[in-house]
């Protein structure tokens, strides 16, 4: 939707646009400069293109950006207290509560986070450069707030597979797989036993296809899938 801006569009920045997806929904948005953004499930973004820069704020969720080159106007994504700055590149940003994950598949981006000096209370920006096939995980509660990892082509494609409507897993524990799957459905899924939560899972599943996951754990691990008033219980 458009926010009201009564100023002349020729002299001032254009109005902010909001884009949102519901649980299980994905959308591709073509922006005014022909950049595109692919919104994942349950995502909200604000697009605020200005005369000197292109601003996008990820309010919640996850988005994949394919940025059109424009060296006169950097493309900046704000996620919480962190920013990702690019000119022409392809990268994703995911906001998980206070944490941020960035995956760069093409080009490079400058990642900045606000750092508060515990002695003075002043705020400074700590900047890192992420290059192609690198990922950053930012957790302000961890002893090492920024964790940068270089990943290969296959792992990059796997992490961004959601943008093609597929979720791909490679030995992640069932608990983590269920947490990812349930982002795309309101169905509440519980796991009964601790050892079952740690069970490694691999495979490809269509986004929102929870039955395919249930079929896989039934066939591979002999897991029972019990539907009840609270949702679904996975148990031995």
Image: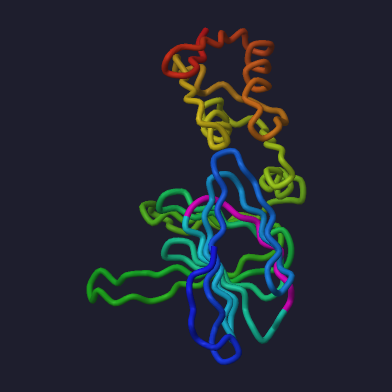
User: Looking at the image, which residue is at 62% across and 25% down?
Assistant: 210
User: Looking at the image, which residue is at 63% across and 32% down?
Assistant: 208
The correct choice, above or below, for 141 with respect to 200 in the image is below
Residue 223 sits inside the magenta stretch = no
Task: In this rendered view, identify the residue nearer to me: 232 or 229.
Answer: 229
| Residue 76 percent location from the top left of the image | 57, 72
The residue furthest left is 119
Q: Which residues are magenta?
A: 60-69
Q: Is residue 20 left or right of residue 106?
A: left
| Residue 34 percent location from the top left of the image | 74, 70
The correct choice, above or below, for 2 with respect to 175 in the image is below
Quadrant for residue 169, please give it: top right
Quadrant for residue 211, please give it: top right
Q: Is residue 206 left or right of residue 135?
A: right
| Residue 111 percent location from the top left of the image | 54, 68
The correct choice, above or below, for 72 with respect to 34 in the image is below
Question: What main secondary structure does the magenta stretch of the protein show?
Answer: strand
Task: In this rendered view, identify the residue nearer to me: 40 or 108.
Answer: 40
Q: Is residue 67 left or right of residue 235?
A: right
């Amino acid at each position: 939707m458009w926010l009201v801006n009564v100023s002349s569009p020729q002299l001032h920045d254009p109005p902010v646009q909001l884009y949102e997806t519901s649980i299980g929904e994905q959308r591709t948005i073509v922006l005014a400069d022909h950049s595109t953004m692919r919104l994942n499930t349950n995502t909200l973004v604000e697009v605020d293109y200005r005369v000197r820069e292109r601003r996008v704020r990820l309010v919640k969720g996850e988005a994949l950006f394919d940025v059109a080159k424009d060296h006169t106007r950097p493309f900046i994504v704000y996620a919480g207290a962190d920013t990702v700055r690019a000119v022409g590149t392809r990268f994703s940003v995911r906001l998980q509560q206070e944490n941020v994950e960035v995956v760069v598949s093409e080009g490079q981006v400058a990642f900045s986070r606000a750092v508060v000096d515990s002695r003075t209370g002043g705020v400074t920006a700590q900047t890192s450069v992420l290059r192609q096939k690198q990922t950053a995980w930012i957790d302000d509660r961890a002893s090492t707030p920024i964790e940068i990892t270089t990943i290969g082509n296959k792992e990059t494609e796997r992490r961004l597979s959601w943008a093609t409507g597929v979720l791909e897993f490679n030995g992640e524990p069932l608990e983590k797989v269920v947490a990812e799957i349930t982002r795309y459905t309101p169905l509440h899924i519980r796991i009964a036993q601790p050892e079952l939560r740690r069970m490694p899972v691999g495979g490809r599943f269509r986004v929102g296809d929870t039955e395919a996951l249930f079929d896989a754990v039934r066939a591979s691990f002999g897991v029972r899938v019990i539907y009840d008033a609270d949702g679904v219980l996975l148990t031995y």
